[in-house]
Amino acid sequence: MLTRMARLLVVKTTAGADAPERCSQAFTVASTAAASGIDVSFWLTGESAWFALPGRAAEFELPHAAPLPDLIDLILASGKVTLCTQCAARRDIGPADVLPGIRIAGAAVFVEEIMSDGAQAVVY
């Protein structure tokens, strides 16, 4: 019998309100994986960086999509959410500005995660 290997799913979203369907897909995939017990690392980059701020996810609307605040809460409860360092700096977002539990980290951490044994990366 095969033993299930622990895997990490790294989901990076580059889309925000500028590409709502792509953004919602990233949140949906990450939260579904987290709810299924999969180890998830969710990266907010580009325009999705704004969702690291309190109240911003609640402003997002897409018909027939789950509310982003619910999805980000689910991911935070069982996985990691990271805001890209450069994306945060370009938007003047600092560590004190983001939702509790969200870390700010850069490319070196992203590369470390996606190159770890058993990791699978998906970029939206």
Image (cartoon, helix red, strand yellow):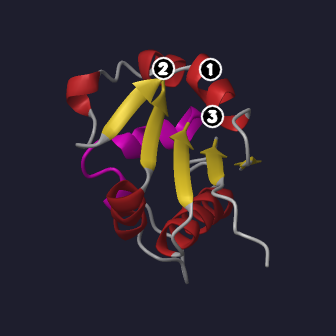
Give residue 40's mark.
Answer: none
Closest to the camera, between mark 2 and mark 1, is 1
Label 1 neighbour load within 10 Å: few <14, some 14-19, many 20+: few
- According to the picture, the residue beneath numbered tag 3 turns out to be 113
Residue at 43% across / 46% down in the picture?
Answer: 80
Q: Name the residue type under label 1.
A: Ala
Closest to the camera, between mark 3 and mark 2, is 3
Q: CA distance from mark 2 to mark 1?
A: 8 Å
Q: Name the residue type under label 2.
A: Thr
Magenta region: which residues? 45-58
Measuring from the top left, give residue 65's x and y in whole percent.
Answer: 53, 77
Q: CA distance from mark 3 to mark 2?
A: 15 Å
**Which of the two residues, 114 or 87, is positioned nearer the viewer here?**
114
Q: Do the residues under discs 2 and 1 have CB atoms within 8 angstroms? A: yes
Check disc 2 and report its element: helix, strand or loop.
helix
Q: Name the residue type under label 3.
A: Glu
- According to the picture, the residue beneath numbered tag 1 turns out to be 107
Q: CA distance from mark 3 to mark 1?
A: 10 Å
Residue at 34% across / 24% down in the picture?
Answer: 93
